[in-house]
Image: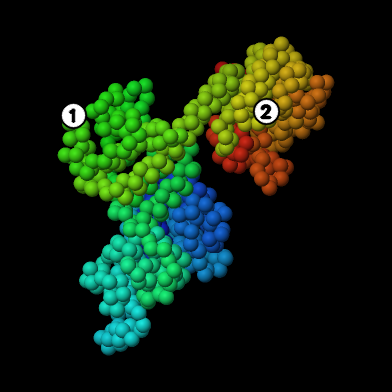
C-alpha cells in the first residue's frame, strides 16, 4: 500500500497526497495514508462524511475525478478548506475502486504553479494509481485486515535524497559558512534538522537546543501567527515565502523559506526594518498559530452543522486532536436533570449512568451550567477537593469543564478530559473558553433547527396519508422526499382513494412554497379532492370543485394537481390535470409513454376554469407513474429531456416490485431543490391466484 501510494504521487507529478478508506457500509471516509504534508495539516480532515462539501466526498459519492485548479476556484467551490488553507495550490480527488465497488478516495496536491487543468498523462497516472490502490484495499478487506476508524493515519517518509560524499559535504559546509547570515533546514513537520552556527547566533540559542524542535516552540518570540502561517504556506503552495520578526529586545530578523519535497531550506539575515511596534509577550499554552488554524477550521465546520449531533461530531473532530484531549462530553440541563447530548472517548455505558440524573452540586458540570464560569482541574486531587463526592470512573487525569454560552446565557457545558495531568495556564484557559463559545453558539442554532425539523416532520406526517388503502387487483407504491433546503416541509402531496370494489381514484399535487403555509394549504387541497371524489364526481368536476374552494379561500398560493379515476373492472382510466406534469404509462413490454392532456389552469387562479379530460386503457401488466416536478426538474436541464430520461428509467426494471422501482426513481432524481412525491400504480388480475 505504501509503495503504491508513493508511486501514484511520483508518477502524477504531485508533491503530496492523502489516501482515504471507506469501510464497507460506512457513511464516512477515514484517512489512512499521508504523503508529502505533515499530519497536523491533514488531521482536521481525517474523517470526511460522504455528505461533506469536500472534494474527496464529491469524488467518492459521484464516482468521478474532481479537479480544483487553484486558490480562487477552491474558495468558490469548497469554502471550508479554502478558509482553513488560504494558500495557492491545486488539488485532485478521485474514487479508489475495484470493479464496481468503491473502497475509498485519493487526494493529490500540486504546487500553485500548476496549470489550470490536468494533463492527459497526469490523469492517466491518477486513474492507474487509483486502480492499484483499489485492488490492494479490496484484498485487505477480503483478508479481514482492520480498517481505520479513529486511529492516526500513517505518514510516508519523504523520498530519500542523494547522499553526498565526504568531500561534497565539506564543500557544502564551507559554502554555507561563506554566505551572509545563517541557514537552517526544516523537515516537513517544521522541525529543525540542521542549523549553521551563524544562524544559531542570529536567533540567540544553542544549536543543540534547536535541533529537533520547531522554531516557534523553541523560541518564544517566534510564537506569532504569521511565522507558522508562512511555514504552512510554503508547504502547501510549494512557493518561497518570507517574513520578518523581532528578536527581543531590538533585533529584526528576515527569514526566507524555500520548500521542496523533503522539507524547507531557510535563510536568516538581519533586517533593516525598525519601525515596528514591539510585540506582546506570547502567552503560555498552545501555539497561537495552531490555535488560529483550528479556530478557523472549527468556525467553518460549525457554520454547516444543522443539528445537535452534527455539532457534537464537528466539535469532537476538531477540538480533540487540536487540544490533545482524549475525551469529550457535551451536556445541558433539561427539567432539572443532566442531559448528555453527545460524547467521544467515553463508553456508552458510563454516559448512560449519568444521562438524566438529577442536577446537584456534586456534579462538576452542574456548577458550570448554573454560573457560566469554566472549571479547570489539573489533577484528580484538584477535582476531589472541589467535588469530594465525585467518583473517579473515567480513568482520566485532568479535566476542563467549559460553559457553552449563547445570547449571553449558559445553555450547556463542554467537558474535555486528558489522560495526563495538565496545568491549564491562563493563555490556554482563554483559548478553551473561546472555542467553547463557538460550540455554544452552534449548539443553540442546532437545537432550534432540531425543534423546527421535528415540528415540520410531525406536521408533514399528519397531512400525508399514513398508509394507502388496500385495493384488490391493485399494487401501489408511494414515496415522498422533502427538499434539501429549509425545514424539510413543503406542499407536495399524493392520495389513493378507494371509491368502491372496482373503482379507485389517485391524486397528486404540488402547492407553491416550502413553509408551513404551503403545508397547511396542501392539507386543504387534499381534503377537498378527497371529498369531491367520494361523492362520485368526474375528474374534471373534482378539479373544478377544488379550484372554486381555493379561489374562495384566496390563500395567495397556487397549486398544481393531477387526478385519475381508475375503473379496474373495465380496465379504463380517465384523468384531468391542473398544470401538473403529465403521468407516464409503462406497458408490459417496457415501452413507456407520457399521457398528454391539455392542462387546465393551476388551482386557485380563475374560479370558472375548466379542466379537459383524457380517457385511456389500462392494459395488463402496465404501471402508471404520477409524480411532482421535483423528480425531473434541475437547473440547466430541459424539462422534456428530463421527462424522457425518467421514462427511460421506468422502462428497464421489471415491474414485479413497485417498491424497488420507486427507490430506483428516487435514487436517480436530482439533488432535491424541490420536494419530490411519486405514486406508482399497477392493476393486476383479481382472483384466487392474486
Question: Does 318 appear above or below 3?
Answer: above
Any mark on residue 659, and which? none
Whether residue 367 can be seen here: yes
| Residue 416, placed above or below residue 251 | above
660 and 628: which one is in front? Answer: 628
Do tag 1 and tag 2 residues touch (Cβ < 8 Å)? no
Q: Kindly state the secondary structure of the residue where label 2 is placed.
A: strand
Quarter holding the C terminus is: top right
Residue sitting at x 59%, y 21% = 463
**Mark 1 crowdedness (10 Å alpha carbons): few <14, some 14-19, many ≥20:** few
Residue 374 percent location from the top left of the image: 31, 38
User: Residue at left 62%, top 31%?
Assistant: 514
Residue 275, quarter of the rendered image = bottom left
Say which quadrant the N terminus sits in. bottom left
Q: Nearer the viewer, residue 81 or 203?
A: 203
Q: Secondary structure at mark 1?
A: loop
Q: Nearer the viewer, mark 1 or mark 2?
A: 1
Q: Which x, y percent locates residue 519?
A: 62, 25
Q: Residue at x 24, y 73 (%)?
A: 207
| Number of residue marks | 2
Residue 523 image point, x, y percent: 63, 20
Q: Which mark is residue 511?
A: 2
Q: Quadrant of residue 482?
A: top right
Q: Nearer the viewer, residue 478 or 484?
A: 484
Residue marked by disc 1? 389
Amino acid at each position: 500500500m505504501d509503495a503504491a501510494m508513493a508511486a501514484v504521487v511520483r508518477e502524477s507529478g504531485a508533491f503530496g497526497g492523502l489516501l482515504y478508506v471507506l469501510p464497507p457500509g460506512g457513511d464516512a471516509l477515514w484517512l489512512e495514508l499521508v504523503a508529502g504534508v505533515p499530519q497536523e495539516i491533514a488531521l482536521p480532515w481525517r474523517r470526511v462524511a460522504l455528505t461533506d462539501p469536500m472534494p474527496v466526498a464529491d469524488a467518492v459519492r459521484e464516482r468521478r475525478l474532481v479537479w480544483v485548479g487553484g486558490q480562487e476556484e477552491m474558495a468558490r467551490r469548497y469554502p471550508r478548506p479554502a478558509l482553513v488553507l488560504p494558500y495557492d495550490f491545486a488539488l485532485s480527488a478521485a474514487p479508489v475502486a475495484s470493479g464496481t465497488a468503491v473502497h475509498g478516495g485519493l487526494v493529490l496536491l500540486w504546487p500553485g504553479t500548476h496549470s489550470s487543468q490536468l494533463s492527459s498523462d497526469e490523469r492517466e497516472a491518477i486513474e492507474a494509481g487509483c486502480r492499484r490502490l483499489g485492488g490492494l484495499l479490496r484484498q485487505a478487506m477480503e483478508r479481514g485486515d482492520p480498517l481505520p476508524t479513529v486511529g492516526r493515519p500513517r505518514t510516508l517518509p519523504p523520498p530519500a535524497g542523494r547522499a553526498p560524499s565526504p568531500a561534497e559535504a565539506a564543500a557544502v559546509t564551507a559554502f554555507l559558512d561563506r554566505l551572509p547570515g545563517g541557514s537552517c533546514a526544516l523537515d516537513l513537520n517544521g522541525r529543525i534538522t540542521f542549523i549553521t552556527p551563524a544562524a544559531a547566533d542570529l536567533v540567540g540559542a544553542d544549536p543543540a537546543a534547536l535541533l529537533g524542535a520547531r522554531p516557534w516552540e523553541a523560541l518564544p518570540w517566534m510564537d506569532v501567527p504569521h511565522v507558522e502561517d508562512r511555514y504552512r504556506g510554503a508547504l502547501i503552495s510549494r512557493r518561497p515565502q518570507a517574513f520578518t520578526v523581532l528578536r527581543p529586545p531590538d533585533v529584526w530578523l528576515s527569514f526566507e523559506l524555500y520548500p521542496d519535497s523533503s522539507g524547507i531550506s531557510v535563510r536568516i539575515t538581519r533586517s533593516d526594518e525598525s519601525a515596528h511596534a514591539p510585540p506582546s509577550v506570547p502567552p503560555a499554552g498552545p501555539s497561537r498559530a495552531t490555535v488560529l488554524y483550528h479556530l478557523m477550521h472549527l468556525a467553518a465546520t460549525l457554520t454547516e452543522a444543522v443539528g445537535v449531533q452534527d455539532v457534537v461530531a464537528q466539535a469532537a473532530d476538531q477540538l480533540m486532536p487540536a487540544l490533545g484531549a482524549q475525551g469529550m462530553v457535551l451536556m445541558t440541563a433539561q427539567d432539572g436533570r443532566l442531559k448528555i447530548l453527545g460524547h467521544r472517548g467515553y463508553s456508552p455505558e458510563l454516559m448512560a449512568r449519568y444521562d438524566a440524573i438529577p442536577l446537584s452540586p456534586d456534579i462538576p458540570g452542574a456548577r458550570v451550567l448554573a454560573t457560566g464560569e469554566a472549571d479547570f482541574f489539573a489533577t484528580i486531587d484538584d477535582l476531589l477537593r472541589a467535588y469530594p463526592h465525585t467518583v473517579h470512573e473515567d480513568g482520566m487525569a485532568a479535566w476542563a469543564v467549559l460553559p457553552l454560552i449563547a445570547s449571553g446565557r449558559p445553555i450547556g457545558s463542554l467537558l474535555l478530559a486528558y489522560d495526563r495531568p495538565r496545568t491549564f495556564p491562563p493563555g490556554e484557559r482563554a483559548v478553551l473558553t473561546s472555542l467553547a463559545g463557538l460550540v455554544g453558539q452552534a449548539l443553540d442554532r442546532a437545537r432550534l433547527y432540531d425543534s423546527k425539523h421535528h415540528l415540520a416532520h410531525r406536521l408533514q406526517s399528519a397531512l400525508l396519508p399514513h398508509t394507502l388503502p388496500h385495493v384488490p387487483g391493485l399494487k401501489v407504491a408511494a414515496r415522498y422526499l422533502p427538499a434539501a433546503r429549509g425545514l424539510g416541509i413543503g406542499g407536495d402531496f399524493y392520495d389513493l382513494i378507494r371509491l368502491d370494489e372496482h373503482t379507485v381514484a389517485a391524486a397528486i399535487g404540488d402547492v407553491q412554497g416550502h413553509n408551513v403555509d404551503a403545508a397547511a394549504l396542501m392539507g386543504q387541497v387534499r381534503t377537498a379532492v378527497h371529498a369531491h371524489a367520494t361523492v362520485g364526481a368526474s375528474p374534471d368536476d373534482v378539479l373544478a370543485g377544488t379550484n372554486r374552494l381555493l379561489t374562495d379561500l384566496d390563500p395567495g398560493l397556487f397549486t398544481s394537481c393531477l387526478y385519475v379515476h381508475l375503473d379496474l373492472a373495465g380496465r379504463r382510466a380517465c384523468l384531468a390535470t391542473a398544470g401538473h406534469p403529465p403521468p407516464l404509462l409503462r406497458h408490459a413490454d417496457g415501452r413507456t409513454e407520457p399521457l398528454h392532456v391539455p392542462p387546465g389552469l393551476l388551482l386557485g387562479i380563475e374560479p370558472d376554469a375548466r379542466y379537459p379530460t383524457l380517457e385511456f386503457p389500462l392494459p395488463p401488466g402496465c404501471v402508471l407513474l404520477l409524480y411532482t416536478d421535483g423528480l425531473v426538474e434541475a437547473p440547466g436541464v430541459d424539462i422534456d429531456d428530463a421527462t424522457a430520461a425518467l421514462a427511460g428509467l421506468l422502462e428497464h426494471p421489471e415491474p414485479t416490485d413497485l417498491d424497488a422501482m420507486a427507490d430506483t426513481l428516487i435514487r436517480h432524481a436530482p439533488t432535491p431543490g424541490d420536494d419530490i412525491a411519486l405514486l406508482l400504480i399497477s392493476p393486476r388480475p383479481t382472483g384466487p391466484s392474486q
